[in-house]
């Protein structure tokens, strides 16, 4: 990080003067730094790692629109990570609100981003399923393991499709939290 | 959208930027807010009539040093809080110095005064007026600071808002001092401080909503 600081700072100063080439290199390097940062933060918090790229883009956009708030006499990395943290918290707050208002979309997004292979390779699915409530277990088993449609699973449980989605969403979320720490360690 | 596409878009037609813009906006807002507060006091309450007397003038200066001191320290801190990554390195305790100073002076004053006169020293003539007018008149300077902060990128919204509130309260109290005829140190320490701190508290709470970007 220390070695990067000097180079990044120089590129930022050039970018502030209007040097597009330096700016492009800067943004490319920032995006890989930010990607690593967001992935580790999101896994640490047991959140959906698939969101990392969205947050990276939000930060790049913020770096762009607020690039004049960087004071060249100050170090660059604290400036960058203050924005990164701010946008990450913003993202977490908004995704929480989205869950409360529209659990259906969130359930879909969550199940799309759910990486079965990663789980099946290292973690016993049955043990993981056992950590969540039984009514969620049955629906997740139906839809995610046995390949039934959500409508079928809902009919078997005698509940609405929406309720089934909510159960899947909550269950997967709980499972993600349960494996979060482990996946994060494997990432490194 | 792919991140590479985003970078393409952002680097096309890159314009040079001036990093001093945020500080300049804050400075302008500070100046405009001060003018607005002084003008409002002159038009409504009017200057205190006894300004020729040395005693009155001395107390006016003391109030100004305190209230303007609060505004000035809040302004210096805001210059840092408006930029990401600088907030933590600044020592926020500076903002407390004017308050500590006035409270010490007031304590000293009470120490040398017989206890029977304390109540009169503290209550003064018009403490409710002081407590209402300072926060009300702080609204315009606060709004101007919040507008100016749009050119910055504050990441600690509560503290940034609270500093903007303290600044507005300090500006408003300085203007109120031009009209206020209550000349006692305990009065200033008690009611001016409370009014300004109230501005800081309200400013912090509003800031969390108003300063988002």
Image (cartoon, coloured by chain):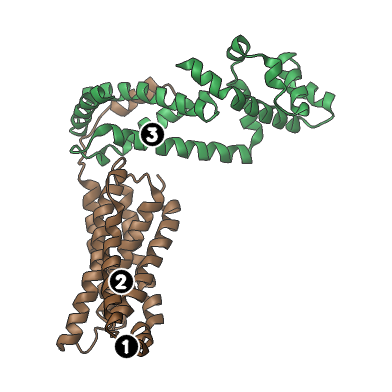
Distance between the alpha carbons at the discs numbered 2 and 3: 41 Å
Residues marked 1 and 3, same chain: no
Q: Residues within 10 Å of mark 1 (few under 14, many from 20)?
A: few
Closer to the camera in the image, B205 or B139? B205
| Residue placed under numbered mark 2 in the picture | B103
Determine which residue is flagged by label 1: B114
Confirm or deny contact between disc 1 and disc 2 (CB under 8 A).
no
Q: Label 2 lies in what chain?
A: B
Q: Residue at x 18, y 38 (%)?
A: A73
Taking depth in this image into account, of B35 and B194 the one nearest to the observer is: B194
Q: Residue at x 32, y 64 (%)?
A: B168
Same chain? Circles 2 and 3: no
Specify the chain shown as brown: B
Same chain check for tags 1 and 2:
yes
- The image quadrant that residue A163 belongs to is top right
The answer to whether residue B28 is left or right of residue A62 is left
* Foreground of the two, A41 or A65: A41
Chain-order first, disc 1 or disc 2: 2
Q: Position of residue B190 (x, y in %)?
A: 36, 75
Which chain's colour is green?
A
Q: Secondary structure at mark 3?
A: helix
Q: Is residue B79 left or right of residue A83?
A: left
The answer to whether A142 is drawn above or below residue A81 in the figure is above
Tag 2 near tag 3, CB within 8 Å: no
- Distance in Å between CA atoms under marks 1 and 3: 58 Å
Q: Secondary structure at mark 1?
A: loop
Instruction: Please give the residue where the numbered disc 3 appears in the rendered image.
Output: A84
Give coordinates of residue B152: x percent, y percent.
30, 46
């Amino acid at each position: 990080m220390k070695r990067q600081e000097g180079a990044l700072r120089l590129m930022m100063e050039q970018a502030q003067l209007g040097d597009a080439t330096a700016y492009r290199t800067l943004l490319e390097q920032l995006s890989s730094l930010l990607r690593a940062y967001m992935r580790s933060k999101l896994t640490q918090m047991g959140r959906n790692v698939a969101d990392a790229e969205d947050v990276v883009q939000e930060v790049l956009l913020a770096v762009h629109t607020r690039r004049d708030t960087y004071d060249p006499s100050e170090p660059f990395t604290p400036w960058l990570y203050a924005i990164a943290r701010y946008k990450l918290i913003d993202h977490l707050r908004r995704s929480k609100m989205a869950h409360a208002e529209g659990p259906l979309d969130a359930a879909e997004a969550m199940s799309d981003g759910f990486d079965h292979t990663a789980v099946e390779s290292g973690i016993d699915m049955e043990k993981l399923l056992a950590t969540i409530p039984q009514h969620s277990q049955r629906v997740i088993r139906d839809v995610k393991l046995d390949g039934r449609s959500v409508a079928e699973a809902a009919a078997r449980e005698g509940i609405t499709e929406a309720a089934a989605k909510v159960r899947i969403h909550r269950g997967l979320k709980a499972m993600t939290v349960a494996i979060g720490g482990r996946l994060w360690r494997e990432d490194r | 959208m792919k991140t590479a596409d985003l970078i393409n878009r952002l680097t096309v037609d890159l314009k040079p930027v001036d990093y001093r813009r945020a500080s300049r906006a804050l400075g302008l807002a500070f100046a405009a807010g001060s003018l607005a507060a002084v003008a409002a006091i002159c038009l409504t309450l009017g200057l205190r009539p006894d300004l020729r007397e040395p005693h009155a003038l001395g107390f006016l200066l003391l109030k100004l040093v305190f209230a303007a001191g609060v505004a000035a320290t809040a302004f210096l801190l805001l210059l840092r809080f408006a930029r990401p990554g600088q907030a933590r390195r600044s020592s926020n305790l500076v903002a407390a110095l004017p308050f500590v100073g006035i409270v010490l002076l007031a304590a000293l004053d009470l120490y040398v005064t017989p206890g029977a006169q304390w109540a009169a020293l503290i209550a003064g003539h018009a403490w409710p007026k002081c407590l209402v007018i300072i926060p009300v008149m702080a609204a315009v300077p606060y709004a101007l600071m919040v507008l100016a902060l749009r050119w910055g990128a504050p990441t600690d919204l509560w503290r940034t808002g609270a500093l903007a509130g303290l600044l507005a309260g300090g500006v408003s109290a300085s203007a109120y001092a031009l009209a206020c005829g209550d000349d006692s140190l305990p009065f200033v320490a008690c009611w001016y401080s409370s009014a300004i701190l109230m501005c800081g508290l309200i400013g912090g709470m509003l800031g969390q909503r108003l300063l988002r970007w």
